[in-house]
Image: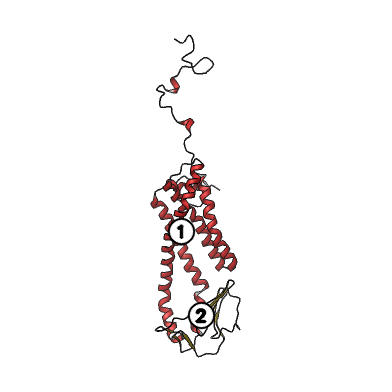
Amino acid sequence: MNLAWLKSDAAWQPLTFKGVAAFASAPFRRLLLIQFLFALLTAATVIWCLGQAWLPTVRQTILQMPETGEIRSGQLSWTNETPRLLAEGPFLSVTADPNHTGEIRVPAHFQIEFGRATVRVLSILGYHDWRYPGKPWIIKFNRTELEPWWGAWSPPLLWMVFGGVLIGLMVIWPLVATFYFVPVWIIGFLANRKLSVAGSWKLSGAALMPGALLMILSLVVYVLGGLDLIGLIAVQLAHWIAGWIFCGGGIFKRPHLQTDASVKNPFDSQPESKRKKNSDGSKENPFQAGNN
């Protein structure tokens, strides 16, 4: 298999140490373009994951709600029997339990439980309660009104999530590179590598892309059932480590600075090739007797 395309010195792929190093000499717009493409791919993956893992459960929850009901003055008005399992999936389940009795527990990764005054979110990390909004908020909590609302607003909500992820990453990655580039520049300086301050920042920004790809792949594998929630969290933490690994690898793929031995003597006006040499190949000593 010919992998010569991975060895190119051009800054176009940040998936190898040499590819990351090449961005140090590339224009800023090249790095921003690559980051934008990775952000697009990440945002599209997040939307796909929501569509596969959570949205079907949300729709099923709405279909199981009573004909009437609302949250008024921070209190849930519920007319059906309780506790009740509204919807269940491998990633998300929803229950109605006004007194938070805990009688219904399902093996979903997240469980949302609507109580009388709070909504409780449970996971392997424990649980947390959020109080409903108080006056003057009135939230419709019934199938009659929520079903058409969800049908009309679910596509715009997904587009808002898509835009939020895209813009968020395009802000976060430059900020992270700003934290990374100082130690990157110092290491490059100590290692005698050709790496400017601006080049260190660009190299740091490019080094975040392999971690982003790891994050994308982990989300896909998680939705397909190849990772549990703990595994997903572990990979999300590890993708930051990947950024440092590629920063280090990129530094040592930068060329060495010119050494002192290779610098031409500014006081030597005679070309090296035209200096006289002795018969043994050594250069002629101008102070040797008999040379005058």
- The local crowd at label 2, few if under 14, some if 14 to 19, many if 20 or more residues have their Cα within 10 Å, is many
- The local crowd at label 1, few if under 14, some if 14 to 19, many if 20 or more residues have their Cα within 10 Å, is many
Q: Is residue 96 above or below residue 205?
A: below
**Picture residue at 51% right of the left edge, 50% below the top:** 247
Q: Is residue 115 above or below residue 184?
A: below
Q: x%, y% of residue 275?
A: 45, 19
**Picture residue at 46% right of the left edge, 61% below the top:** 41
Counting labels gives 2
Report helix, strand or loop for mark 1. helix
Q: Quadrant of residue 264?
A: top left
Q: x%, y% of residue 7?
A: 50, 45
Report helix, strand or loop for mark 2. strand
Do callouts 2 and 1 mark residues in contact (Cβ within 8 Å)?
A: no
Dot 1 amino acid type: Phe
Q: Which mark is residue 38?
A: 1
Which quadrant: the C terminus?
Answer: top left
Circle nearer the N terminus (2, 1): 1
Q: Is residue 227 visible?
A: no
Tell me the CA gap for discs 2 and 1.
35 Å
Dot 2 amino acid type: Val
Q: Which mark is residue 119?
A: 2
Q: x%, y% of residue 44?
A: 46, 65
Query: Which is in the foreground here, disc 2 or disc 1?
Result: 2
